[in-house]
Image: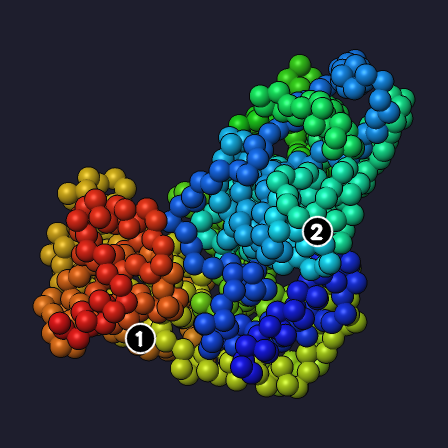
Amino acid sequence: MIFEARIKELRAELDRHNQLYYQDANPEISDTGYDRLFRELEDLEKANPEFADPNSPTQRVGGTPLDSFTTRTHLLPMLSIDDVFEEPELIAFWDRIHKTLEGEKVEFTIEPKIDGVACSLVYQNGELDYALTRGDGASGDDITSNVRTIRSIPLTLKGERVPTLLEVRGEIFMPSKGFAKLNEQRDEQGLQPFANPRNATAGSLKLLDSKEVAKRPLEFLAHGLGAHEGTELESENDYHALLDEFGIRRNHPIWTAQTLEKMLSAIKELDSHRHDIGHGTDGAVIKVVDFGQRETLGFTSRAPRWASAFKYPPEQKETLLKKITIQVGRTGVLTPVAELEPVFVSGTTVSRATLHNQEEIERKDVRIGDTVIVEKAGEIIPSIVQVVLSKRPADAAPYHLPTVLGHQCPSCHGPIEKEEGFVAWRCTNFTCPAQAVTRITHFSARKALDLDGLGESVAIKLVETQLASSPLDLFTLEESTLADLMLDPAKSAEGETISKERRFGEKRTATLLASIERARNNMPMNRWIFAMGISHIGDSSARELSRLHERLSDLANSQIIADLAGLPDFKELSKSKRKKENHPRLAEYHIDDSLGPVAAQNLLAFFKSETGQLISTRLSDLEINPVSDNFAPKPQTEASDEFPLVGKTFVLTGALSAPRSQFKKLIETKGGKVSGSISTKTDYLLAGEGGGSKRTKAESLGVAVINEADLDELLKGA
């Protein structure tokens, strides 16, 4: 069939380009060219689901969220390696090996100990079958859906020596640059940053939504061999050659040694170079090369006798904390930064270290003028470990960020606040210049106003050239100036420049301006509410607000919102008192749990603030007043032909034939409600393939489990 042939052709072509980019670092096409092929394959697979393949390149973006991980037994026990910390322990390891092998010539490899999460990849007949964590060594969590999102891992092995079974063991980790960028993003969002790359990696792999995992900068390097059939392998060298043939990235650099002196020298040389590798390392792994000798040496109950890991001690230095400066992030988060007397630590000179937030400052009791101990978290990010209290000046005072700033943003002098549930202080000014890029990017996002062609790089240049200092400035952009906008050169994932400076151009300008015009005239009110980025107002609460109000301008003086804001916080009430229906005026609106008192309070505060009033005036001047597309403030309370699902609560699980958001919208337009968790109040669990723990819980509570055909019958009123 023509479609099947084209799908196979596209998969092969995309696999080849992945190999060139991630393994060979020699790409042939631009990101745009790759995206064009990817989208064509994605469209063909959606239109022809009978040709689905879990190892298709399109699976790299993640799939349907899991309810939980399943556990699976390892083909061979996945043991750890014994650590040693002193040179005499290394010499003892050397002596034990040679005593057991009775004078045989023994060759060793010495390689970096990657600071990541151990993982096993199982290939059957050249196709990635599944991936497991180490777990307890006997069995591990099946993280296949998450591993498929790691683009450096081949999903299909190609070559003349593809074995029937190959278990590749290695480490999933975060490169230094990726980890630093991820923590910057978390700081910007007011979230607690990860302590080190290993924690970040482990946390990513535990996520049940592989689409979220795909956003994390994860990589994989092979370093060990598990079960294998169909290919004869006699040594580590044979295995390395096989990995290279299949394009599976392996650990590097690697030294070899046949004498104790060379082994000790290699370990020291690795220590001096490991900070330049590009990812966290915390030791050196020493292994016997010959597989036959490994078999002779055998295993203990927890580790192989033919391998050892020498752990390097973390390097720490004392230095002076001269002052604390405050950075205003693009989302308004205020990040305190320690300005240090420069000190050389783990291969580089450190003069600054983030203190993350006020809670971190208080936990470590960091004060200006302190002598502090500095190391690099995960050997990468400068971090203050502790204060040397014996050297604290007598006049060193506790540091309190909001007091020091006078409760004002250092960029715009607007008000700052710390939201409930977050650790960071944030500037709340919608027009704060330090936040302009993020505000514009959020405003333009797919879930917001979906402005085609306006990503972060374009937003940065609009702000830099002063064409836009706030989202509403987009509605005054002119074709001539936008077309001549010069974008920065594109860069690869490794930070290398891969294109020249680019002109935005007439075609992209026409596309963006058409999107802006569509947003002005046709985008529904809930998308506008979400686009404004008001604290505690997500897409669900925005849709509930648009159900309760006919136009955007109705929000500022809404009695519904005022009544809702006056209710006590649900968290402070017992379950029996959490019903909005207890309020005399709110009962008839049947407001769902996505919109509570805190969200209402934030909404009122926004419209009463100087910023909110400025935005309201600007919208009026621009003649923008979006209309609700789901206005129904007093919903049906009894089922009818038009609203057959009134009074019914659904939970969705498993792989459905369309995105869950589509099913959620369908159910809600027919009068039903969709919840995220099973309870005794749930009427139906709509389950696709899988379902896991939600299906089990539904059955235990007596909740009806239905499929899509059953839902069709309910919609017909049957």
| Rendered view: 438 above or below 263 | below
The C terminus lies in quadrant:
bottom left
- Residue marked by disc 1: 628
Q: Nearer the viewer, residue 123 or 18?
A: 123
- Residue 602 falls left or right of residue 417: left
Q: Residue at x 53, y 38 (%)?
A: 74
- Residue 42 at least partly seen: yes
Q: Nearer the viewer, residue 291 or 383?
A: 291
Q: Where does residue 568 sit, x and y in percent of width and height? A: 23, 45
Q: Rounded to the nearest whole Å, what is the CA distance between mark 2 and mark 1?
A: 52 Å
**Secondary structure beneath disc 2?**
loop
Q: Amino acid at mark 1?
A: Ser
Q: Amino acid at mark 2?
A: Ile
Query: Mark 2 vs mark 1: which is more N-terminal?
Result: 2
Q: Nearer the viewer, residue 325 or 90?
A: 90
- Residue 287 at least partly seen: no
Q: Residue at x 31, y 75 (%)?
A: 628
Disc number for residue 248: 2
Badge 2 vs badge 1, beta-carbon distance below 8 Å: no
Quarter of the image for residue 605 reads: bottom left
Quarter of the image for residue 154 reads: bottom right
| Rendered view: 271 above or below 509 | above
Q: Nearer the viewer, residue 648 or 302?
A: 302
- Residue 521 falls left or right of residue 444: left
Q: Residues within 10 Å of mark 2 (few under 14, many from 20)?
A: many
Q: Residue at x 57, y 74 (%)?
A: 7
Q: Where does residue 408 sit, x and y in percent of width and height? A: 52, 48
